[in-house]
Amino acid sequence: MMIKIAAALGVALMLAGCGGSNFETNYTQVERSAAQNWRVANVEVIVPDTLSVSEVNSYMPNADIVWHGDPAGDRHAQVAAIFRKAIAEGTSGLRGKQPVTLRVVVSQFHALTPKARGLGGNVGVHDIRFDAQIFDSRTGQALSEKFPIKADIAALVGQDAADADARGFTQKVEITEHLVTVFRNWLGGYGADPRNSFSRLGR
């Protein structure tokens, strides 16, 4: 028992020392008066090839992309697919006359490894960063500034994660639903406002 406690404390100290403990979902909303005139006709999701990827199943791999919620494969493409799905749902309520292109450039997508997801307690963060910008689909003219968006979410871990998986609420669903809420609220303040800050051990 003492060995297990010591090991758990060691992991917690490692997470606190390497990853910090302050996280947030935060952004500046697009003005509703502008967003209500838009209809998202094009979506561009850019996950730069320069973003590093780790497949290591450790507590906190040092990489821009850490993703184990899909089978082994092109992690850049898998992250892009998650964003495209979230954007499609999160912008479906915009039915204005002006067709626009929403361009997203991902800079970080650090979800949990299976090893980290197996931990219990106040640990585990999906740490997500990207820039978003709106363009006129016909002319290419920028209709908004480039918005930096932080979309951190306290991850389900331990038994909570196992129970969620059993009912189909996987890590992929967890993150996608959070991003849907972020996009919906960012574009004019619709829906629930997910902006918050929290303290947790993790990256």
Image (cartoon, helix red, strand yellow):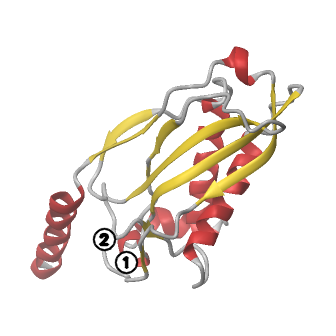
Q: Amino acid at mark 2?
A: Asn
Measure the alpha-carbon separation of dots 2 and 1.
14 Å
Dot 1 lies on which element?
Answer: helix
Residue at x 65% of width, y 60% of height: 82
Q: Amino acid at mark 1?
A: Lys
Residue 178 position, x and y percent, is 58, 47
Circle 2 sits on which residue? 62
Residue 99 position, x and y percent, is 84, 34
Q: Nearer the viewer, residue 138 or 7?
A: 138
Q: Nearer the viewer, residue 121 or 15?
A: 15
Q: Report the side of 146 relative to 185 (left or right).
A: left
Residue 187 position, x and y percent, is 66, 30
Dot 2 lies on which element?
Answer: loop
Residue 52 position, x and y percent, is 41, 72
Count of all numbered marks drawn on residues in the image: 2
Quadrant assignment for the N terminus: bottom left
Quadrant assignment for the C terminus: bottom left
Question: Mark 2 or mark 1, which is nearer to you?
Answer: 2
Q: Report the side of 161 relative to 79 (left or right).
A: left
Q: Does residue 26 show up? A: yes
Circle 1 sits on which residue? 115
Q: Report the side of 93 relative to 123 (left or right).
A: right
Query: Where is 33 relative to 119, above or below?
Result: above
Residue at x 17% of width, y 78% of height: 4
Q: Does residue 169 show up? A: no
Q: Are marks 2 and 1 in contact (CB under 8 Å)?
A: no
Residue at x 56% of width, y 62% of height: 47
